[in-house]
Amino acid sequence: MLGSATAWAADSANDGSSQPDHLAVTQSDFGQTPDGEKVQRYHMTNANGMSVDVITFGGRIQSIELPDKNGKSTDIALGFDNVKDYIDHSSVYFGATIGRYGNRIAGGQFKLNGQTYNLPKNNGPNTLHGGTKGFDQKVWAAAPIDTGDRVGVELTHFSPDGTMGFPGNLAVTVRYTLDNDNDLRIHYSAVSDQDTVINLTNHVYFNLAGAGSGTVLDQVAMINGDRFTPIDKTLIPTGQLKPVSGTPLDFTTPTPIGKHIHADNPQLKYAEPDKGGYDFNWVLNTQGNLDDLAVRVSDPQSGRTVEMYTTEPGVQFYTSNFLDGSFKGAHGHKLGHWGGFTLEAQHYPDSPNQPDFPTTELKAGQKYTQTTVYKFLPE
Ligand code: BGC
């Protein structure tokens, strides 16, 4: 359970064993990076027995404990219990804040104001999730939040001009807060001193039956998106928006995740050539309206549900196609293929190279904002 025995010794009162049954946030040590940077964990609780842990390494959601319909709690977020595992398995991005650019940029290159910017390629020919050392690998500065009806943590990070090839000094803030309606709200803001591109998201994987309990194939998803952005074999959008109707990507009505996952469909083959899996960007019908339901996934067995609301135009629904059970996560659980799903609220992949997609440009001095709410049931 513990990240580093010594680091944790002083904080044993905060290790979850004495969870308050009201809105509260506590802080404890979560070990350190190989460079000696100290990592903190912020533990938020609410009156419904729900808790969320965020660590400052990668601005990550490390754990989400949620009771089932009978009141039995389990951790429904895939994570690790120490910094070393997060570093050793960085390519799964468990729970991470992703930046500067979520998902792929084709050929590791884009043009802005007539200038070409080159980024490190870390996913075949492309740049994925901000490059070789994205926001998921940074230790963020942190301060607790307590507004009376929400508790949480504010994370800040300064990304100097040229980081991973992106222009502009960028100051980023991510606020995670929890309330007694079981809303986990993530609010992002950022300002750059030069024109740049930005696409922040969170890469938490959910398994509503419990992390490590098996696959999510029987969990039932509804994605409020009539269209998706088709991809090529390197998972770069072709630039079209195509209807999901008549395809295995149609989740406009609640459908078990596994129902069509083995369909003989060329797009599914690109996402996961062998076993089947989803890894696509849906064009949300909600059009940035935070009040409208974007996604709902339920586990009929446990009665647990997650809903997503977002100001973003898209969502990457990814069924952990590259997990293969070769390593263990927190609680000693093996994490296998389809062991979780992500709901990454985002602008569409490769937007800097796709003039017809909603823009991801951020002008110098303007404020970027993004809000995504994961709402958990039962309350
Ligand atoms: C991407 C996947 C990628 C995964 C990395 C997802 O956001 O869409 O293609 O493999 O992140 O864990």
Image: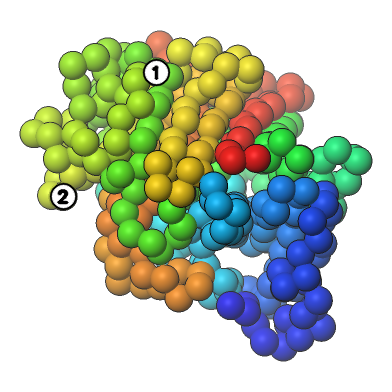
The residues tagged by marks 2 and 1 sit, at their Cα atoms, a distance apart of 25 Å
Is 272 left or right of 316, judged from the image as shown? left
- The answer to which of 55 and 356 lies nearer the viewer is 55
Residue 329 figure quarter: bottom left
Compared to residue 361, the image places residue 38 above or below, namely below
| Above or below 312: residue 142 | below
Q: Looking at the image, which residue is at 55% across and 43% down?
A: 202
Q: Residue at coordinates 39% horizontally, 27% vertically from top-left?
A: 222
In this view, the residue farthest toward the right is 148
- Name the residue type under label 1: Gly
Of the 4 image quadrants, the one containing the C terminus is top right
Q: Is residue 111 above or below residue 262?
A: above
For label 2, the crowd category at 10 Å Cα-Cα, with few meaning under 14, some 14 to 19 and many 20 or more, is: few
Q: Position of residue 91 (x, y in %)?
A: 41, 58
Label 2 SS: loop
Query: Residue 345 location, x and y as percent?
Result: 51, 32
Give 220 or 133, whichever is nearer the viewer: 220
Q: How crowded is mark 1: few (under 14 residues within 10 Å), some or many (20 or more)?
A: many
Name the residue rendered at 58%, 58% in the picture.
73
**How is the structure coloured here?**
rainbow
Which numbered dot is residue 362? none
**Badge number at residue 225:** 1
Element on which disc 1 rests? loop
Q: Is residue 351 above or below residue 8?
A: above
Rendering quarter of residue 26: bottom right
Figure quadrant of the N terminus: bottom right
Q: Which amino acid does label 2 sit on?
A: Lys
Residue assigned mark 2: 275
Q: Is mark 1 within 8 Å of ligand 1?
A: no
